[in-house]
Image (cartoon, helix red, strand yellow):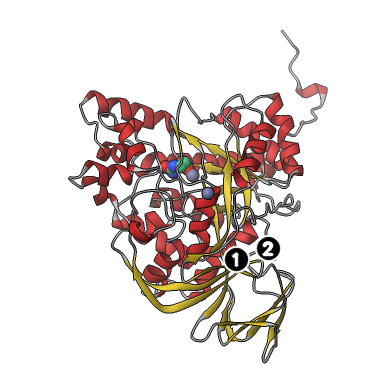
């Protein structure tokens, strides 16, 4: 049964044009005028864009003594409700767990997905076994490995482990990702704040100043350069980290930066809220920053020094957040945003003139597909691409409220924000899975999407490597002093 999307304007990362789009067998088979199909999808007054891809989520993940509250069913349903047709989730082995075992448990969780997904593999500990298993993981279609430079005593890896893993990534054609915060300094600051009786959610932000993020971003960039591998820095929240990425890129290093919709829109004043629950619900790492940092992130998206907008969707209920009453270090870190990323970015980005519609498509879908090696299967309106499409109504509006959300938690960090620009239809492989935000998609219809290793050319370019390549200097015996 074919479908034709009619009456809209196709908006890609490159340009916009009026056209119909024909879909057969879950793929785009023609783009042009006056196409005919068995069914018509009405896109009048709408934009036809590649569905959103969220490159950073945590579904039902064991973390800080609990599990993130959205599972693959509620999480992927929230995604399609807001126009996101694919997510890349973190498979997280607990320390000492085999990577392949962790993958098995993730496959089981993901069997409930209503739309397509892929994984990054987290390197939470290091051993010869992990070194060996990384190859099997790449063969399974996972070409990205995440390293936590924070969460000391839990998930954090040290420089020794990070360098070894980055080199392994280089050999396998994989790309490392980092959560860039100096976990040692954070642990010191947390202890000091607690000793001083500063135990509320606001202390979470004091314990993670921009400097801890900037230092770690710089360090990871240098280590990646020495390992001759590209690098992707998740949840970039501040100018210190952004500046490191900008400088690295100017110097020919292949480094990518991902701000979150939360950091683009919400600021540090949230932690000063008199209501403990309000502040704790916004505890995430890195924390929300000042408006100055926010401006820098927006500028980076427009200028291309930052490439992707994610959510880092790691949602916890109010009850879970209350595990940290009396000790802010025990508040589970994470916020939600899967169903709100596109509408909020459109409202605060496109409607204000900070981003063009084409830039919006780039940072929510196409750049992500290219960087994660999913393009043009995903992230494209092209003949042969999967028909993962959002029919976007730029005039539709609503006020965000937890009362109407799909996510399983009991609040929304964007509560009360009015958005203009919403999905009319979300299509996953040609099937309409949400209509005006209402999800109609069978549990389990989502498929794992494997990602090939990167071609050899996708390597960091390093002057350092050339300058410091080991050379043995040949000397005439006459120039070598006699040994003592
Ligand atoms: O606070 C956050 N970001 N929680 C999720 C885990 C992570 O660090 O990405
Ligand atoms: Zn369910
Ligand atoms: Zn993180
Ligand atoms: Zn995360």
Crowd class of label 2 (few under 14; some 14 to 19; many from 20; radius 10 Å)? some
Which residue position holds label 1? 366
Residue 289 horizontal/vertical position (percent): 32, 50
- Dot 2 or dot 1: first in sequence order is 1
Say which quarter of the image contains residue 127: top right
Mark 2, secondary structure of its residue? loop
Q: Which residue lies under the disc numbered 2? A: 375
Task: Inspect this view and state whether residue 306 appears.
Answer: no
Please name the residue shown 67% across and 59% down the image: 374
- Is residue 46 visible from the viewing direction of this image? yes
Left or right of 226, for residue 336: left
Q: CA distance from mark 2 to mark 1?
A: 7 Å
| Number of numbered tags placed on the structure image | 2
In the image, residue 138 sits, relative to residue 428, either above or below, namely above
Question: Residue 10: x and y, percent?
Answer: 58, 80
Q: Is mark 1 within 8 Å of ligand 4?
A: no
Q: Check whether the beta carbons of the residues at disc 2 and disc 1 lie within 8 A of each other.
A: yes
Q: In the displayed structure, would residue 87 be above or below residue 81? A: above
Q: For the residue labelled by badge 1, is the local secondary structure a helix, a strand or a loop?
A: helix
- Residue drawn at x 43%, y 78% as measured from the top left: 394
For the C terminus, the quadrant is top right
**Is label 2's Cβ within 8 Å of ligand 4?**
no
């Amino acid at each position: 049964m074919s479908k034709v999307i009619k009456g809209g304007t196709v908006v890609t990362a490159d340009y916009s044009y009026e056209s119909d789009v024909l879909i057969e067998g879950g793929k785009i088979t023609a783009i042009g005028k006056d196409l005919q199909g068995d069914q018509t999808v009405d896109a009048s007054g709408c934009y036809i864009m590649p569905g959103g891809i969220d490159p950073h989520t945590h579904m039902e993940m064991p973390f800080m003594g609990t599990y993130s509250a959205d599972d693959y069913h509620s999480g992927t349903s929230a995604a399609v409700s807001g126009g996101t047709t694919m997510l890349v989730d973190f498979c997280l082995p607990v320390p000492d767990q085999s990577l392949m075992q962790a993958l098995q448990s993730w496959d089981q969780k993901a069997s409930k997905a209503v739309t397509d997904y892929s994984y990054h593999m987290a390197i939470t500990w290091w051993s010869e076994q992990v070194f060996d298993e990384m190859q099997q993981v790449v063969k399974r279609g996972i070409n990205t490995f995440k390293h936590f430079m924070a969460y000391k005593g839990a998930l954090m890896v040290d420089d020794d482990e990070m360098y070894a893993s980055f080199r392994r990534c280089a050999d396998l054609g994989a790309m490392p990702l980092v959560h860039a915060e100096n976990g040692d300094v954070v642990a010191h600051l947390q202890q000091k704040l607690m000793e001083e009786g500063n135990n509320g959610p606001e202390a979470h932000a004091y314990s993670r100043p921009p400097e801890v993020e900037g230092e770690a971003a710089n360090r990871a960039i240098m280590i990646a350069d020495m390992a001759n591998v590209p690098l992707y820095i998740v949840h970039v929240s501040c100018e210190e980290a952004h500046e490191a990425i900008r400088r690295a890129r100017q110097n020919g290093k292949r480094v990518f930066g991902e701000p979150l919709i939360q950091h683009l829109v919400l600021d540090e004043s949230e932690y000063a809220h008199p209501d403990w629950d309000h502040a704790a619900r916004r505890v995430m790492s890195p924390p929300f920053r000042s408006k100055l940092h926010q401006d820098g992130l927006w500028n980076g998206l427009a200028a291309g020094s930052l490439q992707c907008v994610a959510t880092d969707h790691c949602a916890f209920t109010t009850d879970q957040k209350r595990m940290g009453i009396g000790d802010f270090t025990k508040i589970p870190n994470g916020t939600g945003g899967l169903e709100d990323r596109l509408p909020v970015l459109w409202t605060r980005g496109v409607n204000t003139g900070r981003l063009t519609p084409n830039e919006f498509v780039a940072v929510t879908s196409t750049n992500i597909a290219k960087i994660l090696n999913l393009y043009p299967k995903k992230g494209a309106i092209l003949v042969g691409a999967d028909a993962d499409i959002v029919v976007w109504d730029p005039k539709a509006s609503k006020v965000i409220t937890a009362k109407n959300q799909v996510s399983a938690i009991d609040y929304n960090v964007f509560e009360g924000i009015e958005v203009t620009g919403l999905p009319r239809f979300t299509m996953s492989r040609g099937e309409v899975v949400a209509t005006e935000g209402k999800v109609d998609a069978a549990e389990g219809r989502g498929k794992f999407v494997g990602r090939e290793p990167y071609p050899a050319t996708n390597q960091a370019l390093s002057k350092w490597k050339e300058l410091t390549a080991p050379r043995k200097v040949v000397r005439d015996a006459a120039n070598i002093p006699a040994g003592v």
